[in-house]
Amino acid sequence: MKANITSRCMHLYREKAYHEQLTVSEITNACFEPGSQLVICDPRNGKYMACCLLFRGDVVPKDINSAISVIKTKRNIQFVDWCPTGFKVGINYQPPTVVPNGDMAKLQRAVCMLSNTTAIQEAWARLDHKFDLMYAKRAFVHW
């Protein structure tokens, strides 16, 4: 069974955006932080099988390739040994859009990461445990 983890970076609030312009390397590294994951699990506890980075805004392929090579050389992020450690990259040169009068700031660049990692087992284990507790009480079982 495959399950994907989505990571979104960087959402800055208006008051921070005026004095923080993050680099491509910074937002790429932030994608791999546990706090950026949309599923509550720690990606450092697993190994990545696939990784796709979708960039928007003021980015150039040179900066993206540099950020990815730094990630690969650090070896903080582990990939399974039976799969090549390639990243798929998508670039949309339009800047990220924001809702008028919303809480999110207008940014120059953003990235969304779609990844497949074994760390998702934590979330599935929690869900399985909750199901077992409900099933033991025969919750939602109608015969």
Image (cartoon, rainbow, N blue to C red):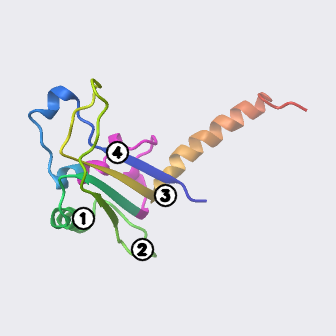
Q: How far, Cα to Cα, is label 2 from label 4?
A: 26 Å
The answer to whether residue 40 is magenta is yes
User: Magenta residues, as a range?
Assistant: 28-50
Label drawn at residue 8: 4
Residue beneath label 2, please? Answer: 81
Residue beneath label 3, please? Answer: 118
Tell me the mark number nearer the camera, choosing from 2 and 4.
4
- Residue at 31% of width from left, 47% of height from top? 33
Q: Is residue 36 left or right of residue 126?
A: left
Q: Is residue 73 above or below residue 137?
A: below
Q: Are marks 2 and 1 in contact (CB under 8 Å)?
A: no
Q: Are marks 2 and 4 in contact (CB under 8 Å)?
A: no
| Amino acid of disc 4 | Arg
Q: How far, Cα to Cα, is label 4 from label 3?
A: 19 Å
Q: Residues within 10 Å of mark 2 (few under 14, many from 20)?
A: few
Q: Is residue 91 above or below residue 38?
A: below
